[in-house]
Amino acid sequence: MPPGLASVNLPAPAPAPDGLGRAMRLLLLAFLCLASVAPARALEPLGPPGRPASAYPPPDRPVAEIISPRWMSDADRDRANEVGQVARLLGIKPGETVADIGAGAGYYTLRLAPMVGPDGRVLAQDVTPAYLAELQRAVASRRLANVSIGLGEAHDPRLPPGSVDVAILIHMYHEIAQPFGLLDNLGPALTGGGRVGIVDADDIPSRHGTPPALLRCELAAAGYRETGFHTLTGGSGYLAIFAAPAPDARPDPAAIRPCRDEATRARR
């Protein structure tokens, strides 16, 4: 059995009539097959809760509805080498822990897990249980023992403190109902030197994008510092890279002022 996979030892069943015994053996075999593909670290306990959503102001922009666990076809994204571009620009290395915030169906999670290797981890987080159930099945079928899956909240990814080297938010920032809370509560999960990469389309939130100027303003309001900005090839949008504030530099939630969404107003 591959390392990291759970094994199950059951006592031999008692003798039974031939037909019933055969049925029991088939059921037992099916159970053991399912057990053998479940990664031992498939479910990750949530970290301690951060500051409550009520502490933060709402964003001054529309919040796009969550409508799909996928942004575009996997084949198109593979042809553009989207994950490879993002991994290179973020400097993701074997042995690192990557948090895939808003993982959806796990397009990035399933491709980053081999990149970080057996000494690395991918923490896949989402707020939609059905998406996580689909991702759980995909992780099990690929026997990815270095992936952990957890249910977060709209204002708090609920990741353990100091557990993450890189956090990625892929084509979902415009769907975050409480961006200031999520960013503020994400900060403590990042290790010193941790990076945050946000991939999105340069469009207004109602069209499932985030104008870069609005993104920069909201990240700055949460204490983040921009360290890089790149246009991705293949129609994948842009990648903005930020550094989280030091623990003693986190802003007071009451002092955060929402950023005015000028792009949406201009297009009405």
Image (cartoon, rainbow, N blue to C red):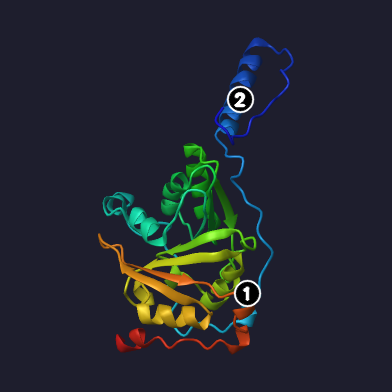
The three-letter amino acid code for the residue at tag 1 is Pro
Q: Is residue 241 left or right of residue 119?
A: left
All told, the count of numbered labels is 2
Neighbourhood count class around disc 1 (C-alpha, 10 Å): few under 14, some 14–19, many 20 upward = few
Q: Nearer the viewer, residue 89 or 41?
A: 89
Residue ID for mark 1 = 247
Neighbourhood count class around disc 2 (C-alpha, 10 Å): few under 14, some 14–19, many 20 upward = few
Residue at x 53% of width, y 46% of height = 136
Residue ID for mark 2 = 27
Closer to the observer: label 2 or label 1?
1
Q: Image quarter for residue 52?
A: bottom right
Measure the alpha-carbon separation of dots 2 and 1: 53 Å
Q: Position of residue 247 (x, y in %)?
A: 63, 74
Taking 258 as reference, is 95 above or below it? above
Taking 192 as reference, is 247 above or below it? below
The three-letter amino acid code for the residue at tag 2 is Leu
Q: Residue furthest top?
A: 18
Q: Nearer the viewer, residue 219 or 235?
A: 219
Q: Nearer the viewer, residue 4 or 244?
A: 244
Taking 16 as reference, is 76 above or below it? below
Residue at x 35% of width, y 53% of height = 84
Describe the element under mark 2 as helix, strand or loop.
Answer: helix
Q: Residue furthest front?
A: 193
Q: Position of residue 206 (x, y in %)?
A: 37, 76
Residue 160 numbered mark, or none: none
